[in-house]
């Protein structure tokens, strides 16, 4: 008798849960676009970044690539911050009434930036500085030399260009994502996609 009651309860529960498994009929309408007198279904999908598997000629090339990747990951946030700050301060700088006010404003901003980022930037290696110069050009659309010349004057830009040349860098270096800096561009694409 107990078995029959147990089987009966089990069957009732199965029918009860089976009712929940049924879904009501719903209509899903797709958006459509009209092309050549015909309506075609259209649905937006998320963009998916696909990157090829990294294959290296030798272990030496692999080490060089991953070293470059570490350096780009280290300086890329500084280049992004530079572009952000230039955009932020540009309207105030251009809105100053006289050259004296502009110089005063530049000194104030320079003091704030050196207090916040000076120690970190001093610790960069020469090759990291070279990458940062190129990435600043990539992010802002202006070379470091042009930015210094616009903000501080031609003589100061000439001085810093001389200092950079002593250490093997060039403030006039431009970013070339197609030929010269293609590896850096690939690394940045991976960083932006969240792969690295």
Image: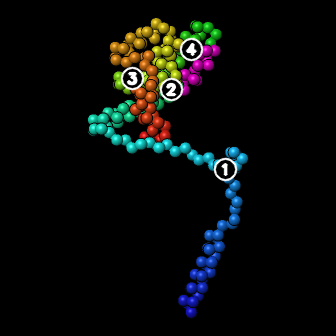
Q: Quadrant of the N terminus?
A: bottom right
Q: Are marks 4 and 1 in contact (CB under 8 Å)?
A: no
Q: Is residue 89 magenta?
A: yes
Q: Which residue is mark 3?
A: 130
Q: Nearer the viewer, residue 40 or 30?
A: 40
Q: First in sequence: mark 2 or mark 1?
A: 1
**Picture disc at residue 105:** 4
Q: Residues within 10 Å of mark 4 (few under 14, many from 20)?
A: some
Quarter occupied by residue 2: bottom right
Q: Is residue 191 magenta?
A: no
- Real-space CA distance between mark 4 and mark 2, rounded to the nearest whole angstrom: 23 Å
Which numbered mark, 4 or 1, is in the foreground of this view? 1
Residue 179 lies, with reference to residue 91, above or below; the image says: below
Q: Residue at x 52, y 22 (%)?
A: 141
- Real-space CA distance between mark 4 and mark 1, rounded to the nearest whole angstrom: 58 Å
Q: Provide the residue span drawn in magenta.
A: 84-95
Q: Residue at x 52, y 45 (%)?
A: 48
Quarter occupied by residue 173: top left
**Outermost residue toward the right?**
37
Q: Quadrant of the C terminus?
A: top left
- Real-space CA distance between mark 2 and mark 1, rounded to the nearest whole angstrom: 40 Å
- Real-space CA distance between mark 3 and mark 1, rounded to the nearest whole angstrom: 51 Å
- Real-space CA distance between mark 3 and mark 4, rounded to the nearest whole angstrom: 28 Å
Q: First in sequence: mark 3 or mark 4?
A: 4
């Amino acid at each position: 008798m107990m078995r029959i009651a147990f089987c009966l309860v089990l069957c009732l529960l199965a029918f009860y849960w089976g009712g929940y498994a049924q879904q009501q009929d719903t209509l899903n309408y797709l958006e459509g676009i009209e092309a050549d007198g015909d309506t075609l279904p259209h649905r937006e999908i998320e963009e998916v970044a696909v990157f090829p598997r990294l294959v290296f000629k030798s272990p030496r090339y692999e080490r060089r690539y991953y070293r470059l990747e570490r350096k780009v990951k280290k300086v890329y946030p500084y280049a992004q911050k530079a572009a952000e700050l230039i955009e932020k301060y540009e309207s105030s700088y251009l809105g100053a009434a006289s050259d004296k006010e502009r110089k005063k404003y530049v000194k104030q901003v320079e003091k704030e930036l050196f207090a916040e980022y000076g120690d970190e930037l001093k610790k960069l290696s020469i090759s990291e500085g070279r990458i940062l110069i190129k990435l600043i050009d990539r992010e802002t659309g202006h070379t470091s030399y042009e930015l210094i010349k616009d903000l501080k004057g031609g003589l100061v830009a000439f001085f810093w260009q001389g200092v950079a040349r002593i250490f093997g860098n060039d403030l006039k270096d431009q970013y070339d994502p197609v030929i010269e800096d293609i590896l850096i561009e690939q690394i940045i694409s991976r960083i932006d996609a969240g792969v690295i």
